[in-house]
Amino acid sequence: MSTSQSEHERTLDEVQVSGVDELKYPISSKLVSAVGGSASDAEKGATSNASSSGVPDGGLRAWSIVVGSILIQFCGFGYTTAFGVYQGGFLLFVFQFQIRPLTHISPADYYTRVHITNTSSSAISWIGSINAFILIVSGLYAGPLFDRGYFYYLLYGGAFLTSFSLFMLSLTQPNHFYQNLLTHGIGLGLGGGMLYVPSIAIISQYFHKKRTLAMTFVASGSSLGAVIHPIMLNNLFTSHLGFQGSVRASAGLVTGVLVVACILLRPRFIPKSNVPKPPMWKLARKFYSEWGYTAMSLGGFFFTIGFYFPVFYLQLDSIKHGRSERFSFYVLVILNGCSFLGRLAPGLFIHSIGVVKMIVISASFCSALIFAMIGLSSLPSIVTIAILYGFFSGIFVTLQAPLVAVLTNDMSELGARMGVAFTCVALGALVGPPIHGALLTEHFIWWRPGLESGIMALTGTVAYTSILFATRKGQAPKA
């Protein structure tokens, strides 16, 4: 017993000092130094391979974990996006702009026109916003609980709450806004939040050199869900099933997928839950004493404020420039389809470019495309922005978790670090869309939110770039 325990502790120590050289990141030793390690520790981590550290770095068991995590993302953030990606097209109702009846109905539109007709669209939109915010900010408790060994509690509890909330959503009564807010907004948000960070953090237990590649595959699950769920719901809502039958069918699909995910996901080791851990506020203070982590959090907050402008408003922009509702519906399907391809791209280039460089490149392209939306008018320009923004935004989103891992020396803190960092992203996502709507006004003055979103995204890009330049100079400035 003592021998196996000592081997387990040794494996944990080796995992914790595993550096970032497996990502071919050229300044890994400086990054480790910046987070409290030493250059010699980084060199040891760089030279250690998967076999010596005990990390499988491949094999049936490891890749089945990736598949399970993809399924979690498909049902979690992928389903959340099924609500949010259609907000732009239905802000027409918020501004009381009259259009002919839509033939393509999303959950938000169905709420507005059929299910919750006594509530404004602006209030209904908070269901999706609160859902996304709770899902991401739940990492504040889900991350530390994962680090303390409560993986199965989070997995089974989150899967049950997600499935239960969807089936309860199918029982909501018309014109009862609070019922939809509790089930769709809060219930699904909490359920998805319990699953989100653990499904990403568990990858580090199974992959060393291929960690970023595996994480890119996991991130593609949400994009796949963002394509499949909206198309499925659109066809169900316009069929004979109606709202309740459509939501039950969707809940059945999600439940079945989550059952498969629960069967596949098994942690390689369970950290001891009785090991004393610092309180969350002390951990956060420690994290933000590191320049790289601080710059990453600032970058995530500012960039996310601008990030959702094309996602929420590209469909509305397309309709306002005379494009058909059918075409405008599929503009966002194109965007999310290209985002799926973009999330797979880092796996091909990450070893030669590096995580931080790819973050900076993708964020720079996204910022430029947000500015380009100011001049959007023709059909080719709409399609071009949808394709390019979908692709580069997919790269950016995929690399958020690997970036946290790159800036983490002690892998036992990875869950907590993800939770704190993703909270900054959640705050940006919460405040961004309302700012865009206020700047757009009922007169649809497009240059105002376009300029504001572009500036915010560019500010975030500068913050990400500062990580690269500071470490290139061999500096690790304190925040």
Image (cartoon, helix red, strand yellow):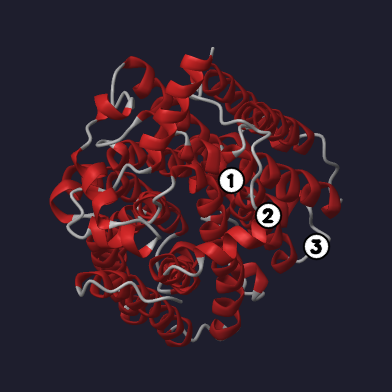
Mark 1 and mark 2: span between their CA atoms? 13 Å
Q: Where residue 119 is drawn, which disc sits there?
A: 3
Q: Nearer the viewer, mark 3 or mark 2?
A: 2
State how far apart marks 3 and 1 are (Cα): 36 Å
Identify which residue is drawn at 59% across, 69% down. 92
Residue 459: percent from the left, percent from the top? Answer: 39, 80
**Sequence-wise first label, 3 or 2:** 3
Earlier along the polypeptide chain: callout 1 or callout 2?
1
Residue tagged 2: 279
Q: Nearer the viewer, residue 342 or 91?
A: 342
Q: Is residue 104 visible?
A: no
The residue indicated by pointer 1 is: 143
Q: Work out whether residue 240 or residue 250 is closer to the camera in this orientation and state it.
A: 250
Q: What residue lies at 42% left-to-right and 44% top-to-bottom?
A: 223
Q: Residue furthest top?
A: 1
Q: Residue at x 52, y 16 (%)?
A: 2
Q: Characterize the local packing of mark 3: few (<14), some (14-19) or many (20 or more) Cα atoms within 10 angstroms.
A: some
Q: Nearer the viewer, residue 123 or 94?
A: 123
Asked whether the viewer can see residue 172, the reply is yes
**What amino acid does circle 1 point to?**
Gly
